[in-house]
Image (cartoon, rainbow, N blue to C red):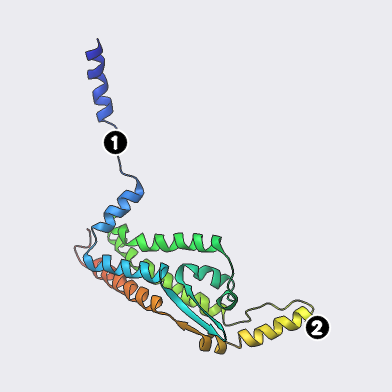
Amino acid sequence: MGLGYGKMDAPQSMGIATRPPLPARVWRALMTLESSSKLAMVCVAFGWFFMNTLAVSLGSLDHGVRFFEMSAVIADPTRLFFGGDTPVHHALFALVCLACLAAPAAAHLTRTRTGWLGHLAPLSLMLTCGALLYWRTSGELLAAPDDAASLQGSLMHLANDLVHRGTDLVSRHVSIAAGSYLAMIGCVVLAVQGIRRFTRPDAFP
C-alpha cells in the first residue's frame, strides 16, 4: 500500500511549477545583455551611488551631492548648501534608481520589441532630475514668511540674496562632478543600444 501511495503522489509533485522569483529572473536577463551594455550599467551604478554628481563650493563649504540624494535636493534646493539628514528620501529614490538601472532587462523578460526601450530609463531619469533641479533653483530657495518685516523674514530675504540670486550664484558655486559625466556616458551608451535593437527587424531577444 505504501508503494501505491508513493506512485500516486509522484505525478502531483512533478506537476508543480517552479518559476524563479522576479529578482532572479531580472538578474538572469541582465546577464544576457551584451558586454557593452553591462559595462555601461556598471558606469551608471558607480556614477549614481559611489561618486559625486554635483560639487558644491561656497566659502568654507565644500561637499558633494550624489545622484541618489537628488530627490531630497529637488524637494528642497537649500540642501545643496545647508545639507540635511533625509534618509527616507535617499532610500526611496535609491530604489527608483535601481529600478531604472534594471530596466534594460525588460526586453528579455517580456520578449517584446518595446522592451528594448527600457534601455532609455536611466537616461530619462537623469534628464528629468536635471530639468527639475534647474526649475526648482530658478526661483527663491527659501520661502519668506508672511510677516516680511519680522526678523525671520529679514533673514529669509538675506539668505535668498546670498544663496540664490536668480541662477547666478548656484551656477558659480555648484558644478557638475565626475560621477555625473561617468553616469551620463553609461546612460547614453544604454540608450543607443536600446534604440539600435528596437529599430532592428529582429528586435526580439
Tell me, yes or no, if residue 199 can be seen here: no
Horizontal and vertical percent position of residue 165: 61, 88
- The answer to which of 189 and 46 lies nearer the viewer is 46
* SS under mark 1: loop
The residue pinned by badge 2 equals: 149
Horizontal and vertical percent position of residue 151: 79, 81
Q: Is residue 11 above or below residue 27?
A: above
Q: Report which quarter residue 27 is drawn in.
A: bottom left
Horizontal and vertical percent position of residue 16: 29, 32
Q: Quadrant of the C terminus?
A: bottom left
Tell me, yes or no, if residue 156 can be seen here: yes
Q: Residue at x 35, y 76 (%)?
A: 182
Q: Residue at x 41, y 72 (%)?
A: 51
- Residue 108's mark? none
Q: Amino acid at mark 2?
A: Ala
The residue pinned by badge 1 equals: 17
